[in-house]
Amino acid sequence: MSLAKGGTLTDRPLSRKPRYQEIADELRAEIEAGVYDVGKRLPSEAGLMERFGAARGTVRDAIAVLQAEDLTEAKKGSGVYLRTFGRIRRNAAQRLARSNWGAGRAIWDSDLKGRSRHEDVVVEEVEAPEHIAGALGMPLGGRVWRRSRLHRAEGRPVQQSTSYLPAELVTGTAITRPDTGAGGTYARLADIGHAPTRFREEIRVRLPLSHEAKVLGITMSTPVVLIARTAFDMEGQPVEVNEMMLDSNSYVLEYHFTS
């Protein structure tokens, strides 16, 4: 028993922990004890509010703790579930190494290491957006081949990516078809003497727009990782710009540096 504000007695002892952390601790203990079936939905916010006598914001903060610990994940329009999807470890250096795509392996093979994957691909020739023309060193109004892809791992949408390549460089090659063949786009660039030898990636993180959340099947509160990669050939000519949007709940980004 303890005194509450105004001198009244309460049944809950004083605690140094915030209330949301206490709720998170109790739910974590239940998860670890197997109270909830793997992959099943946890009680609703309303149910947790009633159970713990807590405000909605407090319950959401508790769930956020469990999500940060990779114990749970929110699914758009459905609720909070025990997490079963293992994060994809994206090793930037390994996936882009010529020893990988030059041997006929897809970049995604490096990321997923045998896990099932699928891509929805749309390829079309378009006028280069202004910022893409600038990045590729093209005049305004120049033409590019745009490769738009939605990547799924184990049936789950995890990344949307759009590549732009100069039309005068790649027209007539397999890059203009949905299936580029073994080794993908970079192997086909190598076939025409423009193998990428250097890459630059710029990374930003923000909350998704509504249509982006819908594409990836995530909630509006789940951040997305935006990666803009430019590939350069041996002469320093930019040969591809790839704009990627990743579900932050699905990835670990790994980088290696040497001095």
Image (tube, rainbow, N blue to C red):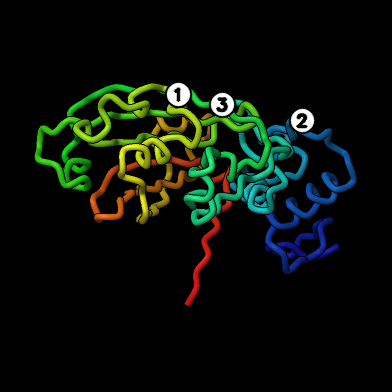
N-term-proximal mark, 2 vs 3:
2
* Quarter assignment of residue 41: top right
Where residue 51 sits: x, y (%)?
Answer: 77, 40
> Relative to the observer, which residue lies in front, 38 or 154?
154
Where residue 105 sits: x, y (%)?
Answer: 55, 39
Residue at figure coordinates x 76%, y 32% from the top left = 39
91 in relation to 76, above or below: below
Q: CA distance from mark 3 to mark 1?
A: 12 Å
Left or right of 107? Residue 80 is: right
SS category of the residue bearing label 3:
strand
* Residue at numbered disc 1: 179
Callout 3 amino acid: His
Residue at figure coordinates x 16%, y 47% from the top left = 137
Residue at figure coordinates x 30%, y 51% from the top left = 232
* Residue at numbered disc 2: 40
Where residue 26 sits: x, y (%)?
Answer: 81, 51
Q: Which quadrant: the N terminus?
A: bottom right
Q: Label 1: few (<14), some or many (≥20) within 10 Å?
A: few
* Residue at numbered disc 3: 118
